[in-house]
Amino acid sequence: MLNKCKAINRFYRSKEWLLARQQKIASCNGRCEKCGAIGEEVHHKIPLTPKNITDPRITLGEDNLIYLCKDCHNKEHHRFEKKEPIFDEEGNLKPYK
C-alpha cells in the first residue's frame, strides 16, 4: 500500500479510514462483494489521488467502497492477466499499452 503521495499514506492510517473500513467489512459480513469468498481488501472504486484525497465522498463514501477477496482485487487492478499479443497489419508485434 506504499504510495508516493504522503497525504494518501496519512489517510490510510487515519481513524476515519480505519472506521470506514471496519464498517464496510461488517456491512458485507466479511465476504467479497463480487464472488462471496472471504474478503481481504476494501477497494476504492474511484482511485485515490492527490486531487481527491480531501473529498470524503471519494475517500470514505460507502458508494465508492467495495470489499473484495484477493483474487477479485487483483482482477480489479488487472494484475497477473495474460495479454494476447497484438500485431499490426504487416505482422509486426505492437507494444502493450
Image (cartoon, rainbow, N blue to C red):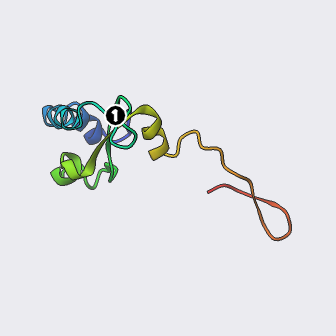
Count the marks: how many? 1
Q: Is residue 34 above or below residue 37?
A: below
- Quadrant holding the C terminus: bottom right
- Which residue was labeled with disc 1? 41
| Residue at the image point whose x is 49% and y is 43% from the top | 75
For the residue pair 41 and 11, the one nearer the viewer reads as 41
Query: Horizontal placement of 80 versus 65: left or right?
Result: right
Q: Residues within 10 Å of mark 1 (few under 14, many from 20)?
A: some
Query: Horizontal placement of 79 versus 64: left or right?
Result: right
- Quadrant holding the N terminus: top left
Residue at the farthest right position: 90
Position of residue 87 measured from the top left corner of the image (x, y, whole percent): 78, 62
Residue at the farthest bottom position: 89
Res. 29 image quadrant: top left
Helix, strand or loop at disc 1? strand
| Residue at the image point whose x is 26% and y is 51% from the top | 64
Q: Is residue 30 above or below residue 55?
A: above
Amino acid marked by disc 1: Glu
Q: Is residue 39 above or below residue 91?
A: above
Position of residue 54 measured from the top left corner of the image (x, y, whole percent): 19, 50
For the residue pair 54 and 40, the one nearer the viewer reads as 40
| Residue at the image point whose x is 13% and y is 31% from the top | 15
Query: Horizontal placement of 73 versus 94: left or right?
Result: left
Position of residue 39 measured from the top left corner of the image (x, y, whole percent): 34, 31
Res. 36 image quadrant: top left
For the residue pair 49 and 60, the one nearer the viewer reads as 60
Res. 37 image quadrant: top left
